[in-house]
Structure formats: structure tokens, C-alpha cells
Amino acid sequence: MKIAIISNSDIEGGAARAAYRLHQGLKSIGINSKMLVQEKLSNDGTVFAPKTRLEQGIARGKLTIETLPLKIYPQRDETTFSIQWLPDRIVPQINRLNPDIINLHWINQGYTQIETLAKFKQPLVWSLHDMWAFTGGCHYNKDCDRYTISCGACPQLGSTKDWDISRWVWQRKTKAWKNLNLTVVALSSWLANCARESSLFQDLPIEVIPNGINSNKYRPINQQIAREVLNLPQDKQLILFGSLKATSDKRKGFHLLQPALQDLSKSGWYNRLELVIFGAERPENPPEFGFNTHYLGTLSDDLSLALVYSAANVFVLPSVQDNLPNTIMEAIACGTPCVAFNIGGMPDLIEHQQNGYLAQPYKIEDLAQGIAWVLENEERHQKLSFRAREKVEQEFTQEIQGSRYVSLFTQVLGNSHSTG
């Protein structure tokens, strides 16, 4: 069985990391997997990207040109909105690899044109890392349900017209994808339900297969050693927060973390806790959390991430909307209990008061209470840590993910041959 995975990158970004982990997992169980990316950051010989300076320049240029039509919406949100209107050269690359199945992942930032999907001869399995595949361009819908009908008058564009770019994107998808041999994989139960409610994917087969993680790389490391390596204090309990663009991406809930920590600081924890942030440098005027704060900058290699999770007593990710965040999975793999709001794919990872705490959505007081609950009892903390690691070993290893994908690929190929 030959698989071609298409992802905009192999490492940069959570979705890219997840796609690359699947690629590695498939190879480790003997599957012939190749990966096509727009930007290659690994030295993996089975990952293919633009090689010449001209091709690389075109790829970089597409990032800018892709967003130009959005300039007509000066009131639009500063969130990712993908139109995918630029032509690409992926079909001849796929023809050279000649796979049995194409596994799509995050294909945005101008990498794959919407219409290209209809040009593939192979069955498609699309692993959804967010909602873009079935919306008119947004990656997370916030409170909008227009993707269940036909998009248009898009609140994220600041548009009041039914015929806007979101309607155009939605119509292009409807027209180009109506005869696709497509199976959808959602990474969380929440995203599967969103896909089933969408006008574009409601009639397609939709499976739930969560991301897998290398549980040998992400594992508990002695906390004292981890702190020594990272130059973090040994005599405090540490709260960890982090993600790509940790402090600037509003969806990750940084604006809710600050008041929750200030509440915690005022309730007797001031001298007992410190905060660690990765994914952001210390700003010139750092916000006041009520605790001494350590900024670690961007961490991208597995060992550094495993060290920082192991150094922490609790990982907090107060996202307002999220699918199946890698950071939560990485944290629990390292035996670090997590606190998050009970939204999106969080309940797939966090078992309330078993390996962490699920706070009531957007309730700052309950977020603070959850952090305190995880930290205040050492014996309970040990049980939470043990269950966190056990959860990953039972449900989220690369081997489990790889075998589930192989079963799905086999089923899809069988169905294609019987109807072909």
C-alpha cells in the first residue's frame, strides 16, 4: 500500500507536526508513505518540497498573493481565512509518486487550490485539523452556523452581503467536490459533529481518529533535572502555558488566562507559584499575572518540549475553540495534568478530575479553581499524573493511530475496487 500525505509543512505548526508524526508512524509499521509539503524543515528523504530557488520563491510569494482579495474587507477579523484560489503543481508530483491513496492534512497558505482535489484519480482521505474544509474560508467558526447552509454575509470578513468571498469559496467547493471519492477523518468527536452538520460534508463517511504521539520521546522526565536544564526554580510549583503564537492568538485564550492567574495570586498562591510561557518571547511591557513569569521563546524540538512539560506541575490551555491540541497531548504524555475549558476536543483528552480539570466554558473563576484543585493536594496530583500518562498509552500512541489509519485505508481501497 502506497500513501501520499499532503500537508503545507512537515514541522512548522501544530497540524504540520501532527501530519509528520502520522507519516513517521506509518513508516514505522512498514507502510510506504511519502509526504508532499510546501515548506520542508526536516531532513527526511521521504518528504518532498520545492527544491529550486525559483520554486521556493514562488511558494513564499503565494503566501502574500493568496490573501490579497481579503483587502476589500477592511473590517475583517485578524484570524486565518483561506481562499485557496491560486493554481498549484501538485497533480504532476502525485502522478510521479503514484500512490494508492492520498491523505490530505492542512493544505492552506496557498498550497493547494480547491479545484485541484477533483483532479486526483486516487481515493482521498482528509484528516481535518480545523473546520476550513467545510466552511467558506474560516478555520474556526466562532458562533457562526452559516457553514451548515451556504456561507455568505461572513461575520469574520465583516461582511453583510450574502454574495461575498465566503459564498464564493463555499460555491467553488460545492462545484469542485461534488463527485469526490472522499472519506473524512476528524481528529475529535466535536469536529466530527461539526462536519456532519455542514452542508458540504453531511453526506460523506466521517471517522474519528485522533492524532498519535511518539510516547518514547514525550514521556515523564525527572522534574528536578528538567528544571535544572531549563534554569527554572526548584522551590516553586510551576504553571505552564504555551502554543504557537501563544500570547497573540486570541483563540488560545491568553486573555482569559491573565485574569484567572490574577485571581489565583490574590487567593493565597502568590509565593507558591510561578508561570512559564513557551511560544512567545518576553514583551517589552510584559502583562502582570500576579506571579513571577519565565518566557522560554519558541520551542520546536521534541526534547525541549518534553523537558518543559516535565518541569511543570500543571499545563493550562484556556482555548475558546480548539480541535485536538498537540500541546495537551504532549503534556499528558509527559505526565503533566492539564486544565482547559470544556470545549471542542478537550474532553477527548482531559478526563475531568481524573487526569486534569475541565472548567466551565469561559468562566475565569472556574479556570482558577481548576488550577488550584490540581495543585493543592500532592497525593491527588500524583494520581492525576499517572492517569495522564496512562491515557496516552491507551489511546494516543503513534502505533495506535497508524494501525487505525491502515485499517481505514484498506477499507477505502476495498470500497473503491468494488465500485470501480
Image (cartoon, rainbow, N blue to C red):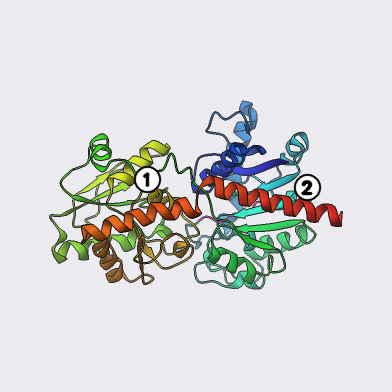
Screen quadrant of the C terminus: bottom right
Q: Quadrant of residue 280?
A: top left
**Which residue is found at the position 58% from the left and 68% from the top?**
194
Region of the chain picked out in magenta, as a range: 80-85
Q: Amino acid at mark 1?
A: Gly
Q: Quadrant of residue 278?
A: top left
Q: Mark 1 or mark 2: which comes first in sequence?
A: 2
Q: Amino acid at mark 2?
A: Gln
SS for dot 2? loop
Using the image as rendered, state which of residue 303 and residue 161 is in the foreground.
303
Whole-percent x and y of residue 101?
73, 46
The residue labelled by disc 1 is: 279
Q: Residue furthest right?
A: 420
- Is residue 280 located in the magenta-colored stretch of the structure? no
Whole-percent x and y of residue 269?
16, 60
Please rate how many residues cluster around mark 2, counting C-alpha atoms within 10 Å: few if below 14, some from 14 to 19, many from 20: many
**Which residue is found at the position 18% from the left and 43% from the top?**
234
**Which residue is found at the position 36% from the left and 72% from the top?**
360
Circle number at residue 122: 2
SS for dot 1? loop
**Which residue is found at the position 57% from the left and 30% from the top?**
44
Using the image as rendered, state which of residue 276 and residue 64 is in the foreground.
276
Please rate how many residues cluster around mark 1, counting C-alpha atoms within 10 Å: few if below 14, some from 14 to 19, many from 20: some
Q: Give the vertical position of 321 relative to 117 (above or below).
A: below
Q: Quadrant of residue 197?
A: bottom right
Task: Using the numbered discs, state the Cα–Cα distance from disc 1 to disc 2 in whole angstroms.
Answer: 38 Å
State whether the magenta stretch is mostly helix, strand or loop: loop
